[in-house]
Amino acid sequence: MEFSAEGPKAIPLWINGHAFLTVTDAFFDVTDPATGEAIRRVPLCGASEAAEAVGAAQLAQPAWAMMGMPARRVCLAALGDALDRYTGHFAKLLMQECGFDEARATGEVGDAVAALRGSMVGETGVFALVLDASRPLAGLAEAIAPALMAGATVVVKPSPKAPSAVYALCELSGRAEWPAGVLNLMQGDTAAIQGLCAAGVDRLVFSGQAALGVQVGAIAEAAGVPFEMKAA
């Protein structure tokens, strides 16, 4: 992931193994907490983008499940190894968007690497993961790795405040030759979550602070979608 020096650049979605560009009415400015400077921006997506992302995950899930657990473990370990090699890059993204110091940012990358390399087995299906900005990378890896090991596919919606490390990990999965559609990403806020619920995911998972999780859970409940909250 590269950014131009002349100003904020929009971070795309990641759908079916590729960057996915979309036109939206509104964008969210991603700011550096230390300076208040707008450094990136994300499109505020909704139902149509959610349908694209969930559709890709649904199409990919049967073949991913048929690969078998040993092959899926190899994919996860390869992604963990790649992430480890780019620790400095990912730590920089976390420092820029979350205000982490270097030690905390590096530690979060290490936690994400450990989760990808040593995952337990969770629940299969097609699920959506909503993240806040408290642990955007480690929270992602810890939530998706067990499900991916079980044969699930996923659509991730990161916090619009801290989207870059999550997007960069999706890019890295492409370089690690993951099957397209296993890991997808959409940008946005409330409308994006509502869109994911309407698109037919098997469950909605939230990883982060409980107060925001309650709000996300209310959206899932209104849509009749099973909901799970993981503490940050």
Image (cartoon, helix red, strand yellow):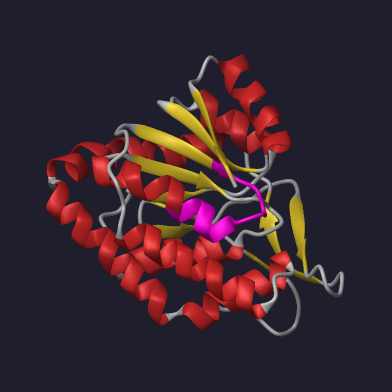
Q: Position of residue 88 (x, y in %)?
A: 53, 82
- Looking at the image, how many numbered discs can be counted on the residues? 0
The residue located at (21%, 45%) in the rendering is 64
Q: Is residue 61 above or below residue 166?
A: above
Locate residue 202: give its quadrant.
top left
Instruction: Determine whether, in the image, residue 104 is placed left or right of residue 83.
Output: right
Q: Is residue 66 above or below residue 180?
A: above
Residue 131 visible? The answer is: yes
Q: 122 and 6: which one is in front?
A: 122
Q: Position of residue 128 (x, y in %)?
A: 47, 37
Q: Position of residue 176 (x, y in %)?
A: 29, 69
Instruction: Determine whether, in the image, residue 152 is placed left or right of residue 229.
Output: left
The residue located at (19%, 40%) in the rendering is 65
Q: Is residue 29 above or below residue 209?
A: below
Instruction: Determine whether, in the image, residue 53 is placed left or right of residue 46.
Output: left
- Magenta residues? 130-141
- Residue 139 magenta-drawn? yes
Residue 3 visible? The answer is: no
The residue located at (50%, 31%) in the rendering is 204
Instruction: Determine whether, in the image, residue 131 is placed left or right of residue 73.
Output: right
Locate residue 215: give its quadrant.
top right
- Residue 220 magenta-drawn? no
Q: 177 and 208: which one is in front?
A: 208
Q: Is residue 84 above or below residue 185?
A: below
Q: Position of residue 84 (x, y in %)?
A: 40, 76
The residue located at (62%, 37%) in the rendering is 192
